[in-house]
């Protein structure tokens, strides 16, 4: 979790600071995302399948990259 926080702060510093001010801890969303390998996040199996492919090829860092990408997309739409 500590590594994720560092990656989050580096890639999305403003959003990370906002989450900290609102007391939104990564555990509140990240465990579900990681434990289900994003199957509950994306309804489109094509996206999920691609994430799994990258996960099996490149390892755990794909999970961090995917989580940051989701947060980046959501912050841009909000």
Image: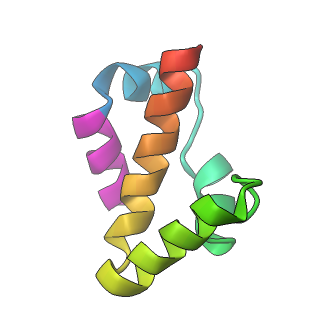
Please determine whether, in this image, residue 14 is positioned above or below residue 32. above
- Residue 11 pos. (x, y %): 26, 36
Residue located 48% across and 18% down the image: 76
Q: Nearer the viewer, residue 41 or 50?
A: 50
Stretch in magenta: 2-11
Residue 1 appearing in the image:
no
Residue pushed farthest top?
78
Q: Is residue 69 left or right of residue 58?
A: right
Magenta region, main secondary structure: helix
Rendered-image quadrant of the C terminus? top right
Residue pushed farthest left?
10
Residue pushed farthest bottom?
56
- Residue 27 pos. (x, y %): 60, 53
Residue located 66% across and 48% down the image: 28
Q: Is residue 32 left or right of residue 75?
A: right
- Residue 4 pos. (x, y %): 37, 55
Q: Nearer the viewer, residue 8 or 63?
A: 63
Please determine whether, in this image, residue 39 is positioned above or below residue 6. below
């Amino acid at each position: 979790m500590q590594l994720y926080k560092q990656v989050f702060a580096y890639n999305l510093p403003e959003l990370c600071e906002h989450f900290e001010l609102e007391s939104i801890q990564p555990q509140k969303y990240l465990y579900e995302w990681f434990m289900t390998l994003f199957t509950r996040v994306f309804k489109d199996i094509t996206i999920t399948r691609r994430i799994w492919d990258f996960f099996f090829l490149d390892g755990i860092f794909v999970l961090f990259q995917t989580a940051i990408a989701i947060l980046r997309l959501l912050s841009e739409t909000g």
